[in-house]
Image: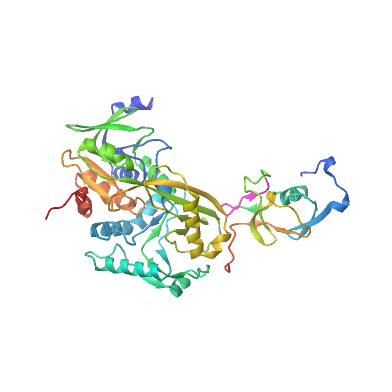
């Protein structure tokens, strides 16, 4: 049986968590010639990628934490080449496009709030994650000749370097690339314990025990349970996101929007919510109606489109919304990685982050993204 | 080709005419559009947006969405859930539908 075959095996790296973050790191390790194992639960485990809107998105990210803005920008700069590698690893397109992203503003108040956010990001040390332009309604209309905007759309902010991609095909591509590079999938396992040993770590699951020189705890909401076993600390809480997709429509929205995006195959994706304290991935009529109503306020003709599916997913959220990375001071070789932006940061996770983990030193880019920023400061 | 059972043959004064891609099809009052099309020998009502594969009425009960067509200018109508009306115009829905630019 599979577990007997792996029970005595030892790996260079064991990544716990086969979601968007863990799989990107595991893929990056495999692509660099290491021998990684990726431990994951089954199809029923919470999967944040399910509630991901598919934006590779910089707007507003890293306010108050310039390292997050810079890390986001680095990932976006890596994305076009990374997308080509992913597309060739996958057996189907991943829908990557670099056309920028529009954040529509309904009413002057929203426009003013966006303007103030841009100003704050502009003024902060290190600047915004990527260039963002404030567009008036006419400029937005010129970019979207095939739709009639709703009367309340007064403008939008537009980040031309941002991209979009389809999250589930991307996750599938990461998995395919991981296996093609010689990675080992250890599926249907719930990790119960991580035991530091002199030469690495034993990872004990309900199926077997594997050994690895390094371990990466990247299991989202499972992190608070496992990370302390290797001296790591990453506070995460669940937030729920709900999604709507319409029937396939003729191309009309060439530039993805925040909250309303037409994917390359024609579906318009609407969402998502950010609901605190919800741990059941279920939809609510009130939230779906509110999301749909906003999309119709942006593009009134969407009222004609049929909704074919709606669903919800649970995503991890950190106290400040920014990613957390750390190597354990007590048990070097043990790492934690968690974020709410697994798609945007995917290229950075598969690239410089995986490289740093293999080298035993996290990249300087994430030095300010350690969890000690949540400790009480005394000055 | 699908045919109506003998027992379902109705007197001529219950028949009406619908048009599929401009071609007249005899229907009977109370037919669903899908039933009338199948009885008239029409099995393909649309082509899928992604691969262009042919689709037509299948479940006949509103579940599969394979029978979508353009009915009296309105796209994505479930023909199995829509009753015929004399003079109704039905057209194939090939590829992704559009939305009217004027709401």
Magenta stretch: residue A119 in it? no
Question: Measured from the top left, where is residue B76 in percent x and y?
Answer: 63, 55
Q: Looking at the image, how many numbered discs can be counted on the residues? A: 0
Location of residue B21 with respect to A361 vertically, above or below: below
Quarter of the image for the N terminus of chain A: give it: top left
Question: Measured from the top left, where is residue A346 in percent x and y?
Answer: 34, 51
**Residue B8, visible in the rendered structure:** yes
Q: Main secondary structure of the magenta part?
A: loop
Left or right of residue A302: residue A81? left
Magenta stretch: residue B49 in it? yes
Left or right of residue B83: residue A26? left
Question: Measured from the top left, where is residue A65 in percent x and y?
Answer: 24, 58
Question: Measured from the top left, where is residue A35 in percent x and y?
Answer: 29, 38
In this view, the residue farthest toward the bottom is A138
Foreground residue among B4 and A301: A301
Residue A70, by quadrant, is: bottom left
Left or right of residue A232: residue B40? right
Location of residue A21 with respect to A9 vertically, above or below: below
**Residue A173, visible in the rendered structure:** no
Location of residue A202 with respect to A325 vertically, above or below: above
Query: Residue, x 74% and y 48% (percent of image)?
Result: B35
Magenta span: B48-57
In this view, the residue farthest toward the left is A379
Q: How is the image coloured?
A: rainbow
Location of residue A326 with respect to A213 vertically, above or below: below
Quarter of the image for the C terminus of chain A: give it: bottom left
Foreground residue among A194 and A2: A194
């Amino acid at each position: 049986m599979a577990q007997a075959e792996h029970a005595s095996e030892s790996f260079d790296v064991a990544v716990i968590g086969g979601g968007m973050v863990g799989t990107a790191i595991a893929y990056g390790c495999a692509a660099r010639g290491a021998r990684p194992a990726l431990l994951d639960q089954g199809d029923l485990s919470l999967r944040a990628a399910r509630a991901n809107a598919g934006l590779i998105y910089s707007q507003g990210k890293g306010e108050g934490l310039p390292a997050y803005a810079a890390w986001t920008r680095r990932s976006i700069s890596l994305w076009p080449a990374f997308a080509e590698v992913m597309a060739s690893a996958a057996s189907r397109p991943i829908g990557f496009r670099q056309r920028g992203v529009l954040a529509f503003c309904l009413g002057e108040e929203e426009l003013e709030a966006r303007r103030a956010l841009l100003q704050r990001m502009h003024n902060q040390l290190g600047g915004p994650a990527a260039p963002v332009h404030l567009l008036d309604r006419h400029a937005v209309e010129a970019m979207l000749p095939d739709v009639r905007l709703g009367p309340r759309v007064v403008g939008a902010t537009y980040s031309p370097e941002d991209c979009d991609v389809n999250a589930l095909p991307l996750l599938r591509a990461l998995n395919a690339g991981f296996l093609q590079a010689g990675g080992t999938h250890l599926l249907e396992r719930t990790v119960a314990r991580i035991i530091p040993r002199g030469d690495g770590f034993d990872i004990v699951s309900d199926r077997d025990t594997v050994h690895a020189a390094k371990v990466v705890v990247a299991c989202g909401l499972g992190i608070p349970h496992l990370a302390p076993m290797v001296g790591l600390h990453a506070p995460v809480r669940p937030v729920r996101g709900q999604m709507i997709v319409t029937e396939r429509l003729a191309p009309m929205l060439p530039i993805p929007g925040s909250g309303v995006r037409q994917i390359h195959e024609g579906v318009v994706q609407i969402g998502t919510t950010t609901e605190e304290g919800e741990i059941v991935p279920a939809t609510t009529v009130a939230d779906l109606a509110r999301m749909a109503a906003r999309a119709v306020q942006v593009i009134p003709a969407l009222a004609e489109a049929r909704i074919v599916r709606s669903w919800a997913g649970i995503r991890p959220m950190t106290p400040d919304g920014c990613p957390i990375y750390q190597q354990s001071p007590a048990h070097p070789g043990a790492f934690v990685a968690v974020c709410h932006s697994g798609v945007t940061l995917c290229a950075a996770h598969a690239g410089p982050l995986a490289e740093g983990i293999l080298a035993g030193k996290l990249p300087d880019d994430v030095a300010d993204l350690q969890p000690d920023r949540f400790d009480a400061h005394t000055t | 080709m699908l045919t109506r059972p003998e027992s379902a043959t109705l007197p001529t004064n219950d028949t009406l005419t619908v048009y599929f891609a401009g071609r007249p099809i005899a229907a009977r009052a109370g037919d669903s559009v899908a039933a009338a099309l199948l009885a008239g020998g029409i099995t393909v009502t649309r082509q899928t947006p992604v691969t262009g594969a042919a689709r037509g009425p299948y479940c006949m009960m509103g579940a599969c969405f394979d029978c979508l067509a353009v009915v009296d200018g309105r796209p994505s109508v479930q023909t199995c859930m829509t009753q015929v009306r004399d003079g109704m115009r039905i057209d194939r829905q090939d590829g992704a539908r559009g939305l009217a630019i004027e709401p």
